[in-house]
Image (spheres, rainbow, N blue to C red):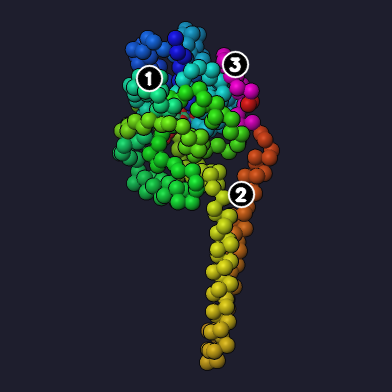
């Protein structure tokens, strides 16, 4: 019988976990040809999430769990899940039931029968999301797709089922600052997309703030393209060109009074100063990443688990 692990990252999801467990069980009971494992990754929850997961594991053999020593973020939770899954197919699904478990049988069919390597959900609308978030995220994907060689589907979700070889490729990527949407797309493979309506959370609330989203966007851009490093070069050329024009203009223009040329000079100094500071800022962002990656800290620390690590990446 083929084995399937469903990775469920959970951060303060106590309110929704019993419902999720019931819904996932209903769906897995309808797929008797597969042997399922539910791998809950408790990402340092401060509520009753770890207790609920452990009590589920005590009465249900197919429930496995990994508990982090603190909150490391969903990226780390997904990675830990993938490193600990040793099944033929590996799925990722949010705990809040925004990803409908009813899609799982179809997705399994795509990878098991139809020959796809990945079956992944993509958002068919942005209902229930704030206008600001939709506009900002639309712009973010526009920019990243223009400047990076890795094309990222704006609507792709983490909800997916992958073959073992795809997961092996993903966990072989050693970076510690992880941007899964980029990584999923970078590894390639044959993907079948499932348009999926945006659903309200079954309970609890989103863990994303504007600050977290901005950090995520910056991680995405800096992790998948070095193009911003070229901006200072272009700005430098423009600035030199403008300086030459001004110089010519200054020689010709005898009539300009001392005061206005003083203001012009100040503006020019400020402008060039701003360009230099921005350029150093961009260099700094990349340098910060080199610094973080060279430290080679683990992406997460496990405090408790009932499942052995499958890959030796840890
Ligand atoms: N999550 C996590 N660690 C975090 C934040 C979120 O494991 O630091 C989990 C969360 O429990 C949920 C999934 O990631 O299962 C998606 O989070 P959320 O629903 O808050 O994001 P949204 O759906 O609003 O994008
Ligand atoms: Mg959600």
To which residue does mark 2 refer?
Answer: 286
Task: Kindly identify the residue that appears in the image at 41 percent across and 40 percent down.
Answer: 153
Does 309 lie within the magenta span? yes
The mark closer to the camera, 1 or 3, is: 1
Does 305 lie within the magenta span? yes
Q: Which of these two is toward me, 21 or 196?
A: 196
Q: How packed is label 2: few (under 14 Cα within 10 Å), some, or many (20 or more)? A: some
Q: Secondary structure at mark 2?
A: helix
| Sequence-first tag of 1 and 3 | 1
| Sequence-first tag of 1 and 2 | 1
Instruction: Report the disc number at residue 233.
Output: none
Q: How packed is label 1: few (under 14 Cα within 10 Å), some, or many (20 or more)? A: few
Q: Secondary structure at mark 1?
A: loop
Q: Which residues are magenta?
A: 298-312
Residue reaching furthest bottom? 255
Instruction: Report the disc number at residue 308.
Output: 3
Task: Kindly identify the residue that appears in the image at 54 percent across and 53 percent down.
Answer: 227
Instruction: Report the disc number at residue 113.
Output: 1
């Amino acid at each position: 019988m083929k084995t399937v692990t469903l990775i469920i990252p959970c951060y303060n999801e106590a309110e929704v976990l019993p419902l999720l467990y019931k819904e996932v069980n209903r769906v897995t009971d309808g797929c008797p040809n597969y042997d399922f494992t539910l791998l809950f990754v408790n990402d340092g929850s401060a509520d009753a999430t770890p207790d609920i997961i452990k009590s589920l594991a005590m009465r249900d053999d197919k429930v496995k769990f990994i508990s982090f020593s603190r909150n490391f973020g969903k990226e780390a939770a997904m990675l830990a899940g993938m490193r600990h899954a040793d099944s033929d197919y590996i799925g990722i699904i949010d705990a809040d039931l925004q990803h409908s478990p009813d899609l799982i049988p179809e997705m399994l069919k795509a990878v098991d029968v139809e020959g796809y390597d990945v079956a992944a959900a993509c958002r068919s609308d942005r209902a229930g999301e704030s206008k600001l978030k939709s506009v900002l995220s639309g712009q973010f994907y526009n920019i990243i797709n223009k400047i990076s060689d890795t094309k990222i589907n704006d609507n792709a979700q983490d909800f997916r089922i992958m073959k073992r070889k795809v997961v092996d490729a993903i966990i072989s990527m050693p970076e510690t600052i992880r941007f899964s949407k980029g990584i999923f797309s970078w590894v390639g493979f044959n993907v079948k997309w499932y348009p999926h309506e945006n659903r309200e959370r079954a309970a609890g609330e989103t863990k994303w703030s504007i600050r977290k989203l901005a950090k995520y966007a910056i991680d995405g851009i800096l992790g998948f393209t070095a193009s911003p490093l070229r901006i200072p070069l272009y700005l430098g050329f423009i600035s030199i060109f403008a300086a030459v024009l001004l110089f010519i203009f200054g020689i010709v223009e005898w009539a300009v009074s001392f005061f206005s040329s003083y203001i012009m000079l100040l503006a020019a100094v400020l402008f060039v100063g701003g360009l230099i500071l921005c350029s150093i800022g961009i260099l700094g962002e990349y340098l910060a990443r080199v610094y973080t990656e060279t430290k080679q800290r683990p992406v997460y620390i496990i405090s408790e688990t009932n499942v052995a690590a499958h890959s030796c990446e840890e």
